[in-house]
Amino acid sequence: MLYVGRITGRKGLAVFCKTILARILEQHPEARTLVVGDDPVNALHRGKGERAHVEAILNENGLMQTVLFLGKIDDHELSAAYFAADILVFPVQQRKNDAEGFGMVAIEAAAHDLPTVAFAAGGVTDAIADDVSGKLITAGDNKAFSEAVINLLRKPFPIRKGNDIRAFAAKFSWPRFGERLRLFCNPRF
């Protein structure tokens, strides 16, 4: 499993490690989670010590050996992490006055043929097509989130067998965006 993003309360890594990860490991004890990212430094709503909080949760629950924190990595290493993973976990939390934006990591994962399991919160619903590029789970339904991950680890994402998840990601490419923008700004063309 792969988590990519800043480590903040809204991104949900603490919730994942506290209430979801153990359920997954009961069914798949060999599963591991790679965490790419760290506490935000220059963000408007930066939190202090969220990574330490997540590590404390893992230690309290005896799960520290199942999670590897990679910190910030370069683009080549990030691409390799996407290709190496079986699932991107995106446990973003629904919060009043602190909504998740678009969810670009889900598009990046799809571009690497990697399905995403995410809570349907904020702009994430625009970045994932349910049952096409991943699974959208009702926000806050930790049990359903863990079940979706367990099922995908048990049986690879069905769409990967035939159609390409990358086709979904291609809809968000810069050339496609430029096309839509030109049509929007000048509908005569």
Image (cartoon, grey):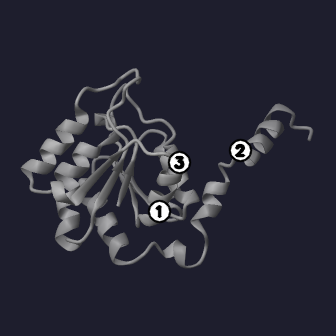
Image spot of residue 133 (x, y percent): 52, 61
Residue where numbered disc 3 is placed: 75
> Is residue 144 or residue 9 the one in the foreground?
9
Q: Earlier in the sequence, mark 3 or mark 2?
A: 3
Extreme residue in the top direction: 44
Q: Secondary structure at mark 3?
A: helix
Residue 115 got which mark?
Answer: 1
Residue 30 position by quadrant? bottom left
> Left or right: 189 with respect to 7?
right
Could you tell me how far apart the alpha carbons at marks 1 and 3 are, in whole angstroms?
19 Å
Say if 130 sits above or below 14 in the image: below
**Residue 92 point in image, percent of width and height:** 35, 43
For the N terminus, which image quadrant? Answer: bottom left
Q: Which residue is mark 2?
A: 174
Q: Amino acid at mark 3?
A: Asp
- Residue under the image location 24 percent in, 34 percent down: 50
- What is the x, y in percent for residue 48? 25, 26
Q: CA distance from mark 3 to mark 2?
A: 18 Å
Disc 1 marks which amino acid? Pro
Please give left or right for residue 84 compared with residue 56 in the image: right
Residue type beneath disc 2: Trp
Residue nearest the viewer, comparing 66 with 45: 66
- Crowdedness of circle 1 by 10 Å Cα count: few (<14), some, many (20+)? many
The residue sitting at 77% across, 41% down in the picture is 178
Horizontal side, residue 104 vs residue 62: left or right:
right
Res 99 quadrant in image: top left
